[in-house]
Image: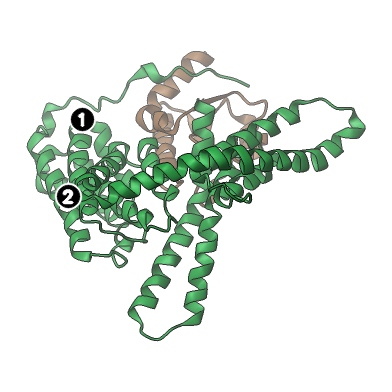
């Protein structure tokens, strides 16, 4: 399980720059084409190219997930499998999306790990490495991904996305989905739970319905509200925050603006229940507003997502309202600072590591 | 003690460096020599040299992802922990190492 989680995080880690590149490029080129009347062919071409790069994201993700498990030799088999997850080659099957890409990364990683362990006579060893692994695992991944996975997971993927589209188009449910996605991001501030929400956003990112950009906007409050709120709250209610926390406030507000939720962590470590609780409340209300009104954006990273918002007024209000709610809540429920004993993070029970060679 | 460490998180901009600072502070406070390599978004920074790795008493790997260039770490006494553990309780980690190595 730990190995699986590490592989998942490695995949996310290596695909992130590609997401940022294609997301920002699509957003900016889209904006230029919209705001300028005359056509720029070069801009439109760049936009098309960025979409091509976007389609490679599952392949890169699966490649590096496989790499985390089976090392270098697993990269290309993982890439092949992940590519098929986005581009099913067999007629009558559908893209298996991120679900398929996760399976591709796992299968490629473990198959390569297994083959590497098979002992062969020395004269065959170089052939095993240069020929067997790329060709055989490539074929294996092709067969598995193009047939059963593209068929079954593809159908499942279609089913999930279709239902989410229905949900997101019915305001009475959409607000709930937005609230949940934002709350997930605010819950662990850049950790695995939030990553699930973000992974979901990327999974439906290039769906033709435009759902990707709607759920993308819905996670913005979850990303921005926590860091903004702790910063602003610590400046307002100085007696309830430590010296260090007040000093960190400007950096935290700036981080919140550019979409780095992690700067909330020091505040949350010192007082997890109240800080995380207040942030989740504010973020989920922000997310509910955002998605309830169906606001969408192709931008990523905090304020950089703003210019691309389909409704700037509601976009900003959602984040502001979420922040005000979180700030008010934490100021109300936090206790003055001297009531705390020293930082209480020394929970020694998770220190069950062993020293190995 | 000579402590060396490597930190790496998924995004590679925040937790990686928070863990680095936590390990450095805790190690210094407990009177150890310390050097921390980060494998963040741009790659390896403050890289550990072969000499530093050879001389180290313990290598702490605080990571959520697969590390790069792990062949350097073979045959060195090491512990592997999640990044969050290093940030939350680096002091406890080092205390535990002291006990185990004693």
Which label was assigned to residue A328?
none
Q: How is the image coloured?
A: by chain
Q: Residue at x 36, y 82 (%)?
A: A36
- Asked where in the image residue A189 lies, by quadrant, the reply is top left
- In the image, taking residue B40 as reference, residue A272 lies left or right, namely left
Q: How far apart are marks 1 and 2 (CA)?
A: 17 Å
Residue A7 rendering spot, x and y as whole percentages: 54, 35
What label sits on residue A323 in the rendered view?
Answer: 2
What color was chain B assigned in the picture? brown
Tag 2 secondary structure: helix
Question: Do callouts 1 and 2 mark residues in contact (Cβ within 8 Å)?
Answer: no
Name the residue tied to disc 1.
A273
Q: Which chain is green?
A: A
Asked if marks 1 and 2 fall on the same chain, the answer is: yes
Quadrant where the image shows the C terminus of chain A: top right
Q: Residue furthest front?
A: A92
Mark 1 falls within which chain? A
Number of numbered discs on residues: 2
**What residue is shown at x 46% (from left), y 82% (from top)?**
A40
Picture layout, residue A208 above or below residue A9? below
Q: Mark 2 lies on which chain?
A: A
**Left or right: A180 in relation to A337:** right
Residue at 34% over, 50% down? A165
- Residue A217: % across, % down: 30, 55
Could you tell me which residue is drawn at 36 percent across and 54 percent down?
A211
Query: Dot 2: few (<14), some (14–19), or many (≥20) neighbours within 10 Å?
Result: many
Direction bottom: furthest residue:
A38
């Amino acid at each position: 399980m730990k190995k699986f989680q590490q592989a998942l995080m490695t995949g996310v880690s290596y695909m992130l720059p590609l997401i940022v590149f294609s997301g920002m490029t699509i957003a900016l080129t889209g904006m230029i084409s919209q705001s300028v009347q005359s056509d720029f062919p070069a801009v439109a071409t760049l936009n098309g190219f960025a979409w091509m790069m976007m389609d490679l994201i599952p392949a890169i993700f699966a490649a590096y997930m496989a790499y985390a498990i089976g090392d270098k030799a697993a990269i290309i088999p993982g890439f092949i499998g992940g590519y098929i997850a986005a581009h099913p080659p067999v007629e009558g099957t559908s893209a298996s999306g991120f679900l398929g890409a996760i399976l591709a990364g796992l299968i490629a990683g473990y198959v390569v790990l297994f083959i590497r362990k098979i002992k062969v006579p020395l004269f065959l060893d170089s052939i095993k490495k240069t020929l067997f692994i790329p060709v055989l695992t490539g074929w294996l991944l092709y067969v598995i991904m193009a047939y059963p996975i593209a068929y079954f997971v593809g159908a499942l993927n279609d089913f999930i996305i279709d239902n989410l589209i229905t949900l997101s188009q019915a305001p009475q449910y959409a607000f709930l989905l937005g609230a949940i996605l934002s709350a997930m991001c605010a819950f662990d501030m850049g950790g695995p739970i939030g990553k699930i929400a973000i992974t979901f956003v990327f999974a439906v990112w290039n769906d033709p319905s435009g759902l990707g950009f709607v759920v993308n906007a819905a996670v913005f409050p979850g990303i921005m509200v926590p860091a903004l709120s702790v910063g602003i709250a610590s400046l307002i209610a100085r007696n309830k925050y430590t010296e260090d926390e007040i000093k960190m406030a400007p950096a935290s507000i700036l981080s919140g603006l550019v979409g780095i939720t992690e700067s909330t962590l020091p505040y949350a470590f010192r007082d997890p229940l109240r800080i995380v609780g207040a942030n989740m409340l504010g973020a989920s209300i922000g997310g509910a507003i955002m998605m309830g009104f169906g606001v969408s954006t192709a931008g990523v990273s905090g304020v950089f997502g703003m210019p691309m918002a389909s409704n700037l007024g509601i976009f900003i209000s959602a984040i502001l309202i979420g922040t005000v709610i979180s700030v008010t809540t934490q100021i109300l429920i936090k206790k003055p600072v001297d009531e705390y004993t020293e930082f209480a993070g020394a929970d020694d029970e998770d220190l069950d590591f062993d020293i190995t060679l | 003690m000579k402590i060396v460490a490597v930190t790496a998180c998924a995004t590679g901009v925040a937790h990686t460096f928070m863990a680095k600072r936590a390990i450095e502070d805790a190690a210094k406070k407990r009177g150890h020599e310390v050097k921390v390599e980060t494998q963040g978004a741009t790659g390896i920074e403050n890289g550990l040299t072969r000499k530093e790795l050879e001389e180290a008493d313990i290598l702490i790997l605080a990571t959520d992802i697969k590390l790069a260039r792990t062949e350097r770490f073979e045959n060195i006494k090491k512990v592997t922990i999640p990044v969050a553990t290093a940030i939350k309780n680096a002091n406890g980690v080092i205390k535990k190492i002291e006990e185990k190595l004693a």
